[in-house]
Every structure is written in C-alpha cells, then in structure tokens.
Amino acid sequence: MAIKKISFENFTVFDKIDIDVCSGVNVFTGGNGTGKTHLLKVLYAWCECEMHKDLSHDNLDFLSKMSKCFNGGSSNISFLIRNDRKAAKITVTTAINEFKFIIKNALLSNDVPAFVKNVQSIEDKEIIPSALIPAKEMLTHSGLEKDYTQRKLPFDITLIDILNKSGVSILHDLPDNMRSLLKKIEDIVGGKVLFENNRYYIVKSSGKKIDFTVEAEGFKKLGLIYRLIETGTLSNSSVLIWDEPESNINPQNIPVIVEILLELQKIGVQIFVATHDYFLAKYFNVKKTADNDVLFHAFYKSDDVVLHESDADFTMLENNSIVKQSIELYKEEVKKVME
C-alpha cells in the first residue's frame, strides 16, 4: 500500500499543503521549523494504526499513535491545530485508498482534548510494517522501552518503538539481496552487530565484542539499519522513515548509506528521509539509476506560510535552502581570497 500523497490543512506549521510523493525514496529538505519532522511523525502514525470501514466511531487508534508521537501519550493534541478556530485536516492517499482525518477542538480551548475522526475509508487498513529512525541515537539506551511500558514514562513513542523493533529475534531465511546489504554494513563497522542480554555489540572479525557504548556514533546508526534488516522489519512493502541520517555520520560513509537506501528501495521499501545535509541529498542525485525512484522535496517559508516544491533532480529545486547555503559559503570563500 504505497503512499502517494499527504495533505495538511491548518496543521502545525502548515496552512494548506499537498505533497505528492513517489513509491521509492523521498528526500525532504528545508530550514528549521518548516515541518519536516511533523510530516515524518504523521506518516509513521498512519503506518502504525489500523482503520476500518465503520465510520460510526472516532478512530482512536490513529489518535492514540499521534498523541504518543507528538505529546508523550497525552490525549490532548489540540496544540497541533494551527488556528484553533478551525479544524485541522490530514489526508493520506494511497494507490487505492484515501484516508481523511479531522482534528477538532470543540470548545476552542487548549484544556479540551482534541479528537480525530476517520471521515472516509474505502476499505480496511492494517498496520504497515514500518520504522521511524529518530535523529537521536537510541540503541545505547536499550532497556528504556521496559521502563516506558511499566512506568508509563511520557516519552516520544518513536524513541521507544525503534528499540522494540530492533530488539526482536533475527530472521534466518533472509533473501540474498538483504544479506548483501548486511555484508556491506559489516565491512564498514568491522564486524557483525549482536543483540545479547539487552545490550548491543559489534563482534569484530577477531571475535572481540565491542559494546555499543564505546563505539563510534556513526557505527551505531549503521548498526540500527543492520538490525532492522536482519529482524525483517525492513522488507518488501514496508516503510522506512529516517530523520537526519547524516547525524553523527562521517562524510566518507554518507555514500554507503545512500547506496543502502537505494538498494532497499529496489527491494520494495518506501523511504522518507529528512535532511539538512548537502552531501546526502547530492549523493542521492548522483548515485540513483534507472532502477531507482527518487523524488526531492523542498520546504520553505513565505509570509509565515510553509510552501513546497518537488523535483526528481535535486539541483532543479528553486527554493533549496541547502544549495543556497553552500553558495553563500562559496561566496564567503571567494570574498576572503579577493581580500
């Protein structure tokens, strides 16, 4: 069930916006406060919830997941409404379905819980295998998911979910194309990733186990992808959502991350990436082939309204904050040389 379009109206920073996405890799860029992470969280909540034909009841599953993604579990998500005198609307369109939601604040008061209602669904939707990798590295916090469950900690659920999804048992019948991706990661981090007694390690070729707490941050990010692949979370018809893949990654490993994501796309994983990094976005542009479906999306503000543009060519985006900043840096370098 590939996502084709997502639309927001009066939702957080968005006044009204319609974003057509591709079934492959979608790369989102934009300055701080333009809604990239909000978009990723909505997509994740939608993948993780179930929806039904019966429209006689509020869709509490989607409401619950949204509230846990944005507000640590509190049912009051009225703060997501841009103008509290209007309803916020979210629409997710797939190849065969369109799912619409309304978030209302009935008494126009932040003290009144908002509610979400599924106002149109052609047929039932089941949970879609998905993973949202947050910008924050989480594997060294393994065990937090147990405290979250037992003590009802008010954490962003995306930080907890990624621990749960990376901590399950591995699949022993992975297809060869997936095993080749594991080998590519092993070559970078210097060994296999191991989850044992609720801790993560890299088992080096010498047999020595290195605890994740003393490993390089970039290796931990790659180790997480390794776990999501070998546990089967990432497979055909699944969705990968990754916020700032470049965070804590040495630039020399950026091309490998891009290659891995492009390979996952060819296997059938739909991917959504938000980035501030020129190299990451540019490498997608350079390394994609005819077998890859890649679309770039730039968010930008105009008169306090977030707008967007999309193009299959990263360099053709006119409101590209990443490219603009690289040009400014170049100008500064030329100016310094001339002086």
Image (cartoon, grey):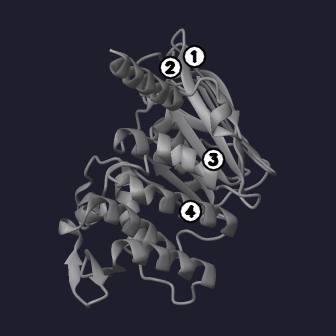
Q: Is residue 145 above or below residue 104?
A: below
Which residue is at the front of the view, 29 or 268? 29
Q: Are marks 2 and 1 in contact (CB under 8 Å)?
A: yes
- State the residue position of label 1: 86
**Disc 3 or 2, which lies upstream in sequence?**
2
Q: Nearer the viewer, mark 2 or mark 4?
A: 4
Residue kind at label 1, given as amino acid type: Lys
In space, the residues marked 4 and 1 are separated at their CA atoms by 44 Å
Looking at the rendered structure, the secondary structure element under dot 2 is loop
Residue 82: numbered disc: 2
The residue furthest left is 214
In the shown orientation, is residue 4 left or right of residue 251? right
Q: Identify the residue shown where x is 31% and y is 87%.
A: 205
In the shown orientation, is residue 295 left or right of residue 187? right
- State the residue position of label 4: 259
In space, the residues marked 2 and 4 are separated at their CA atoms by 38 Å
In space, the residues marked 2 and 1 are separated at their CA atoms by 8 Å
